[in-house]
Amino acid sequence: MSLDIEQRLRVFFASAPQTVHAIQTVELSHSAMPQVWRLWREPYAGQIAIEDGTLVDVLPLNLQVGLADVQGNLDRKYDIHLDTTDVQDQFRESMAAIPLDTDEKVRCVYREYLSDDLTAIQAFAVLEVETASYQVGAATLSALYPRWNVTRTGILYTTRDIPMLRAFL
C-alpha cells in the first residue's frame, strides 16, 4: 500500500518532533547611553516579554554568552562576545557616550527563553560589565554579578536581589 507524496508529507510533518530550543538574550543599559541595547542570536528582529510583562524589541546579533571561570563562589564571571559588524558604529557611539570618570557600571541583563514561548523567562541574571574590549566588527564584554557580599561592600546577598541564590542554599 503506497501513499502519494502529499499524504506522506502530511504524515511526516504531523509526526516530526517539535524543535524547542533555548534563546539567549542580552540587554545592555547605562544612564548615559542614548539607547538600551536588547540583543539575541536569532536571524530576525523580534519581541520578548520582560519581567513586568511589557513587550520589548530585540535586535538580531551574533552573540555568545559563556562562563569565564570556574570559581566555587557566588562571584560568577561571564564573557559575552558580540559580532557588531552590522551595528558597529552605533554600538561604539553608544558605549563612547559613557563618561570615563563614572562609577556607574553598564548593566547587563541576561535572559533565556524557550523558542515556543517568548513571554516566559526561563533564566535571568542581572550583571555588571567590568571590562569591554573592541576589535573591528566585534566586542567582548566581561560581566559579573554585583559584588554585594559582606567582605567586599558590607551588603549581604539576598534572594530578593538574586533569585538564583535559592539553588545554592
Image (cartoon, rainbow, N blue to C red):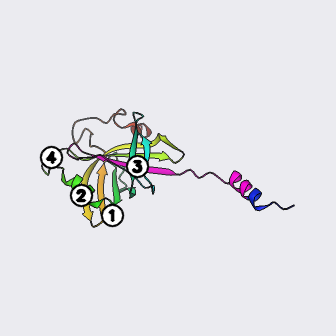
Q: Which residue is mark 3?
A: 25
Question: Is 11 in front, or is 148?
Answer: 11
Residue pointed to by mark 4: 102
Which portion, as a residue range, is magenta? 9-37
The answer to whether residue 79 is left or right of residue 12 is: left
Give how far apart the Cα atoms at labels 2 and 1 are: 11 Å
Q: Earlier in the sequence, mark 2 or mark 4?
A: 2
* Spatial CA span between label 3 and label 2: 19 Å
Badge 4 or badge 1: first in the primary sequence: 1
As measured in the structure, the alpha-carbon distance from the residue carrying label 3 to the one carrying label 4 is 26 Å
Residue 10 quadrant: bottom right
Which residue does the image show at 14% across and 52% down from the upper left? 100
Tag 2 residue: 92
Identity of the amino acid at label 2? Arg
Where is 159 relative to 114, above or below? Answer: above
| Callout 1 secondary element | loop
Q: Amino acid at mark 1?
A: Thr
Residue 16 falls inside the magenta stretch: yes
Taking the magenta stretch, the answer to whether it contains residue 43 is: no
Looking at the rendered structure, the secondary structure element under dot 4 is: loop
Q: Is residue 46 shown left or right of residue 126? A: right
Q: Name the mark on residue 85.
A: 1
Compared with 120, 136 (above or below) is below
The mark nearer the N terminus, 2 or 1, is 1
Residue drawn at x 31%, y 46% as measured from the top left: 127
Label 4, label 1: how many angstroms apart (C-alpha)? 28 Å
Q: Residue at x 33, y 63 (%)?
A: 85
Residue mark closest to the camera, 2 vs 4: 2
Q: Residues within 10 Å of mark 2 (few under 14, many from 20)?
A: few
Query: In the rendered structure, which disc, 3 or 1, sits on the residue that comes first in sequence?
Result: 3
Of tags 3 and 4, the one toward the viewer is: 3
